[in-house]
Amino acid sequence: MPEFQTSPGMRDILPPESARWRRFVEVFAQVCESAGYGQVIPPLLEDLGVFQRIGDATDVVSKEMYDFEDKGGRHVALRPELTASVCRAFVQHKPVVPWKVWYAGSMFRYEKPQRGRYRQFDQVGIEVLGADDPYLDVEVIALGWEFYKALGLQQVNLLVNSLGEPDDRARYVAALTAHFEAHLDALSPESRVTLQKNPLRVLDSKREQDAPLVAAAPHIADFYSPESAAHFDGVQAGLRALGISFTIDAKLVRGLDYYRRTTFEYQGGTLDSAQNALGGGGRYDGLVESLGGQPTPGVGFALGLDRTLLACEDEGVFGAPPQAVDVFVVDTTGGLEALRLTAELRAAGIRADRAYENRSMKSQMKVADRSGAAVALIVGTNELEEGTVVVRPLRQHDTDRGAQTAVARTDLIPHLRNLL
Ligand code: AMP
């Protein structure tokens, strides 16, 4: 074993997988920019306080944060998510509303690593600040939906819920607490702890022991104010108008404390239920205010890149894009010609690679075959003298493009453009 390896829950993303990651972000950018969203790039590190405003009852904040004191004595943390940073940026820069932004990047959470769960992981997401319209919630949900479609995923289920306004939520939490406290003995020890910290999260319990009590719990819909109910009705009507199928899941509370009214989650139909959340989001109308801004409504989502790619593998879609070069230069005259030729080809927009260390023709041809290039360009002493290059098709299906031919250096680029 080498002395140094990546830390637990952290990975190197190597080619060609890294090309798949990049394309993932490119597809996401296209979907977002088609709807008027611009990219925001906040720093990886913020004052710890920014993330504490997410809420202390959230595991992400209370247990999983990578926080430390910097050399100036400032208590900082690596971002565990980006919504709080985006709201901090909004308060700091006061952009015109509605502020519609998208982002992509790495997040850090000190979690127990497992398949689909890492300590450094990537998310893409969008946030819209400054508009309260239920059809905006629908636009946001629909963009996530469009993105999954653009990747080629078909087995994605959309769950939606509303947690009501803070007052509704507070009355609901009181009723929920009373319900669970009346049956405390029947509750699992873990859920009893959760109940003390965040009663809503007891609804998330996947323990069998808790199932009957969770099933019998009061229903959030019975606590909606007329305004909350109207907002949620609008969201549902909008989703139906776009033909997006969804399931209402009254127990969908999601892990982050800041959600109000709409919450939603996209689940991968092919993944294990413990790890099947591809992404999710909701409204967080109080977050900007808690970061020192004017009361500002907000809605957004974050989608996990890793789990979405696992779902793509399961469905056999969105594989790594081909990365082969177009041509491979084999130079048996010492390598200077390969240096010149590859530079010329690359400048003309033809992807070109070459062999190094002045190896034998046979050994260079082996590398050329492995490279995946469509043709080898061979330069020997004769060709160098005559000012020609031998163009030899490499792939089986390219042989019908003709056997190898000698082409004048001056005609080479137009010849290749024709051929490739
Ligand atoms: P959240 O920010 O907790 O709402 O998570 C949004 C999405 O990010 C999840 O649905 C996952 O796909 C992904 N995600 C969250 N935590 C992790 C993690 N530790 N490792 C990999 N993906 C994660």
Image (tube, grey):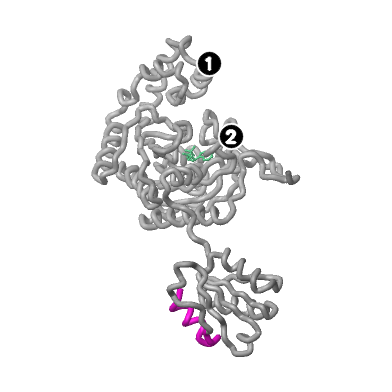
User: Marks 2 and 1: CB-CB under 8 Å?
Assistant: no
Residue 387's image quarter? bottom right
- Residue 88 in view here: no
Closest to the observer: 53 or 344? 344
Residue type (three-letter) at the residue carrying disc 2: Glu
Closest to the observer: 412 or 157? 412
Query: Mark 2 sits on what residue?
Result: 111
Q: Residues within 10 Å of mark 1 (few under 14, many from 20)?
A: few
The reply, left or right, for residue 388 in relation to residue 252 is right
**Relative image position of residue 51 (x, y in whole percent):** 55, 38
Ligand 1 within 8 angstroms of badge 2 C-beta: yes
**Relative image position of residue 142 (x, y in whole percent):** 34, 46
Q: Secondary structure at mark 2?
A: loop
Image quadrant holding the N terminus, namely top right
The reply, left or right, for residue 168 in relation to residue 23 is left
Closest to the observer: 102 or 213? 213
**Relative image position of residue 223 (x, y in whole percent):** 32, 24
Closest to the observer: 213 or 54? 213
Query: Is residue 93 within the magenta segment?
Result: no
Residue for point 26% across, 35% down: 233
Query: Mark 1 sits on what residue?
Result: 189
Residue extent of the magenta highlight: 407-420
- Residue 232 in view here: yes
Ligand 1 within 8 angstroms of badge 1 C-beta: no
Q: Residues within 10 Å of mark 2 (few under 14, many from 20)?
A: some
**Relative image position of residue 321 (x, y in whole percent):** 48, 58
Q: Among all residues in the image, which is located at the extreme bottom?
A: 386
Q: CA distance from mark 2 to mark 1?
A: 21 Å
Q: Secondary structure at mark 1?
A: helix
Residue for point 36% across, 55% down: 35
Residue type (three-letter) at the residue carrying disc 1: Pro
